[in-house]
């Protein structure tokens, strides 16, 4: 009798408590946060949230409601953001070009059901977003959205390791304010010129014509304006960084426990593999890319 009970117990599926593993990636504009975060999330089978796109939705709402960047005008914006239905979804991106090539999935952003993935990258949004993101009540409203989207993304993640679900979120204050207890924090940086050249290349590859501004943001970039140069882009990136570093509420900072990666002279593949392996190491699962020790 005892033996049969033991056999039944042995056959019963073991309930493995799933632990959420959070990877926070912060850094200045165009340092590679979003593309790296999407690739790392894909490699680990984690969910992904682009937190900048939520601030961009808040900015689009402000523009559509005729709310200027004057602080007194923004009083009602936090409430509007709190009532809005903002969703950030990952969708299958381009297939890898060859065996072992990295997959960088696309992101789709929905604002009250409308696909605003391109609209939130407009020149007007680029100009206003850092000012909107410096508003304390707006940040509080966005924080609630970030945490709820992350919980949903984590629960849907198809992590390769049964004990871990996970989410990767990128932004400016993920490791310092949004997820101060994140299991892995990365601060991604590169020289201003390297970032400007990459942003130029990224925007130029999206099409031709004078439609965009000098600094269009991460995914689904609009093409650079005909008059803008790499130097114009560098200036705009630095202006946005300055606002993000010097604002009162959760400014861009390196978390004390963050791993700092300067990728100025690093390939995209190497940074993705290194971060994915750091996550694996902390989850207690084998590394996959031993040649990528940092
Ligand atoms: N190590 C690297 N070497 C070369 N190019 C890179 C590297 N890392 C990222 N990139 C490229 O740099 C460009 C900018 O990256 P990405 O959009 O991910 O930056 P970001 O930090 O999310 O920007 P933002 O803060 O403005 O949203 C992309 O085209 C990306 O593929
Ligand atoms: N965690 C975050 C993320 C973003 N911001 C602000 O939004 C701007 C746009 O971000 P992108 O990543 O889409 O370029 C950014 O410049 C910040 O002002 C933020 O404050 N916190």
Image: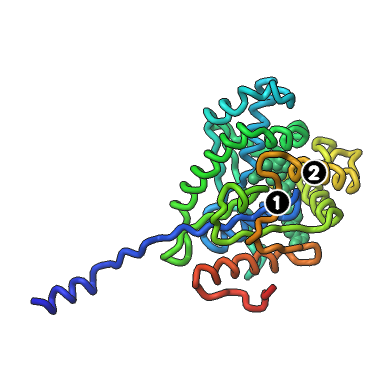
Classify mark 1: helix, strand or loop.
loop
Q: Is residue 29 left or right of residue 250?
A: right
Image quarter where the C terminus lies is bottom right
What residue lies at 74% left-to-right and 32% top-to-bottom?
128
Residue 116 image offset from top left, x and y in percent: 63, 35
**What label does residue 242 carry, if any?**
2
Q: Is residue 90 left or right of residue 9?
A: right
Q: Which residue is mark 1?
A: 253
Q: Is residue 234 left or right of residue 284?
A: right
What residue lies at 68% left-to-right and 36% top-to-bottom?
133
Would you say residue 181 is visible in this rendering?
Answer: yes
Ligand 2 image position (quadrant): top right
What residue lies at 57% left-to-right and 26% top-to-bottom?
80
Q: Nearer the viewer, residue 205 or 221?
A: 221
Q: Which of disc 2 and disc 1 is earlier in sequence?
A: 2
Q: Is residue 150 left or right of residue 246?
A: left
Q: Residues within 10 Å of mark 2 (few under 14, many from 20)?
A: some
Location of residue 174 with respect to 162 vertically, above or below: above
Marks 1 and 2, Cα distance to the nearest angstrom?
12 Å
Would you say residue 223 is visible in this rendering?
Answer: no
């Amino acid at each position: 009798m005892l033996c049969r009970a033991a056999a039944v117990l042995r056959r019963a599926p073991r309930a493995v408590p799933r632990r959420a593993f959070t990877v926070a990636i912060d850094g200045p504009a165009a340092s590679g946060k979003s593309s790296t975060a999407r690739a790392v999330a894909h490699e680990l089978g984690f969910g992904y949230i682009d937190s900048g796109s939520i601030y961009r939705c808040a900015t689009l709402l402000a523009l559509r409601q005729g709310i200027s960047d004057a602080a007194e005008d923004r009083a009602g914006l936090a409430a509007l953001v709190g009532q809005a239905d903002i969703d950030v979804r990952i969708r299958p991106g381009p297939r890898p070009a060859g065996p072992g090539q990295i997959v960088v999935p696309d992101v789709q952003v929905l604002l009250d059901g409308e696909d605003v993935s391109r609209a939130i990258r407009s020149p007007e949004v680029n100009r206003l977003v850092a000012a909107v993101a410096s508003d304390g009540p707006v940040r509080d409203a966005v924080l609630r959205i970030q945490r709820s989207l992350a919980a949903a993304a984590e629960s849907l993640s198809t992590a390769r390791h049964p004990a871990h679900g996970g989410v990767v979120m990128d932004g400016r204050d993920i490791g310092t304010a949004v997820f101060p207890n994140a299991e892995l924090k990365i601060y991604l940086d590169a020289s201003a010129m390297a970032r400007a050249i990459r942003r130029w290349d990224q925007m130029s590859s999206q099409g031709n014509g004078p439609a965009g501004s000098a600094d269009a943001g991460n995914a689904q970039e609009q093409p650079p304006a005909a008059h803008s140069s790499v130097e114009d882009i560098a200036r705009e990136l630095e202006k946005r960084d300055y606002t993000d570093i010097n604002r009162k509420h959760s400014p861009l900072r390196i978390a004390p426990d963050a791993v700092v990666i300067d990728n100025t002279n690093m390939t995209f593949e190497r940074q993705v593999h290194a971060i994915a392996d750091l996550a694996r190491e902390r989850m207690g699962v084998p590394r996959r890319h031993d040649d990528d020790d940092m």
